[in-house]
Image (cartoon, rainbow, N blue to C red):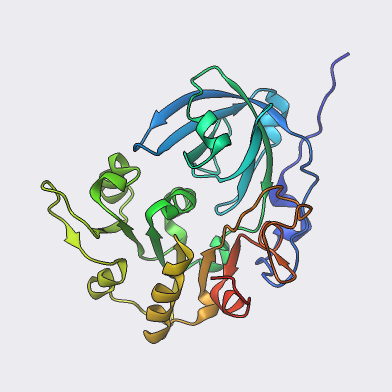
Amino acid sequence: MTLKIPHHDINLEPFMSGPPDFNRKLERIPTERSLKSQILAAIPLTDQEKLFHIRICDPAERGNFSFLPGQFVMLELPGCGEVAISISGSSSNREFLELCVRKVGKVTGMLHRLEAGAFVGIRGPFGTHFPMQEMTDANVLLIAGGLGIVPLRSTIYWGNEHRRDYKDITILYGARDPSQILFDYQVEEWRRIYGLRILTIVEHPDDYWDGRVGLITDLFEDVPIDPDNTFAVVCGPPVMFKFVCTHLSNLGLPRQRMFVSLERRMHCGMGKCCRCNVGSTFTCLDGPVFDYWTVMNLKEAI
């Protein structure tokens, strides 16, 4: 007897019909069950990061899985544990997920030892997303620091696939040094083929770096910003939010049109372990995407 799983598209759920409410818990479909998945490729990006192409094994489950830019999954290594990982691929790609994993602990260290053919588990997707539909007919400013380019990559794909819906799309990307720049092989593709404006900067250049040197806020000197028709998405270390968003606020951009991804010790994705709470707010349920006005009112959020 073959079990047929009914088709389900998360984008048709009532809570997805309008802009997300960042001040309430997100209603979600049940995501307790782990989906058996297989690693198709493990691509080294730096000494610490690898890009995994992961395919959900069951065709029906694979077809039912959908996500929006900014959401994350729980990546499970059976017998070892699981970690929260932002989805960094295109939401239109139904063949496999792209997950960039930094080697920082036991589970991620074991994941880095896996090769193509290994089996893992996927739960999700979880969390709020960047309100891309709300940004229609406006300029979009994407600002990434270090590993922050990972969740922003799905937003870049979305911007390209819906290019006519937006005006100027500008990407500001800062890294500690040139060796830490992720997806450098795609930067020229995004610029030439997708028609996106991309500015990069590093704090500590090497002998071969011929680009800008300094902090990411230095790039604002080269970017004209229309505060009345611009949305900003900021991803990176929490300490970066204060400097970048304060600078944007001084330029006249409303805090409600700045969105940040606040990934904070997420462990279960369902608000049960209480590891990611900031007061009464759980970043796995209420986030990880928040508007900056909300973040400013969350004590100890950044």
Residue 220 lies left or right of residue 277; in this view the side is: left
Give x and y (percent) for residue 195. Answer: 30, 53
Q: Residue at x 50, y 66 (%)?
A: 136
Give x and y (percent) for residue 121. Answer: 67, 30
Q: Residue at x 24, y 59 (%)?
A: 201
Residue 109 lies left or right of residue 215; in this view the side is: right
Q: Residue at x 25, y 52 (%)?
A: 177
Position above or below: 236 against 270: below
Position above or below: 89 against 262: above
Outermost residue, top side: 1
**Residue 99 or residue 93, whichever sits in front:** 99
Give x and y (percent) for residue 102. Answer: 46, 41
Residue 57 falls in image quadrant: top right
Give x and y (percent) for residue 81. Answer: 66, 35
Outermost residue, right side: 1
**Residue 255 or residue 84, whichever sits in front:** 84
Residue 289 falls in image quadrant: bottom right
Outermost residue, front side: 106
Position above or below: 141 against 16: below
Residue 194 lies left or right of residue 249; in this view the side is: left
**Residue 185 or residue 239, whichever sits in front:** 239
Question: Quick one: quadrant of the N terminus?
Answer: top right
Q: Is residue 67 visible?
A: no
Total tally of numbered discs in the picture: 0
Residue 218 falls in image quadrant: bottom left
Q: Is residue 123 visible?
A: yes
Position above or below: 75 against 237: above
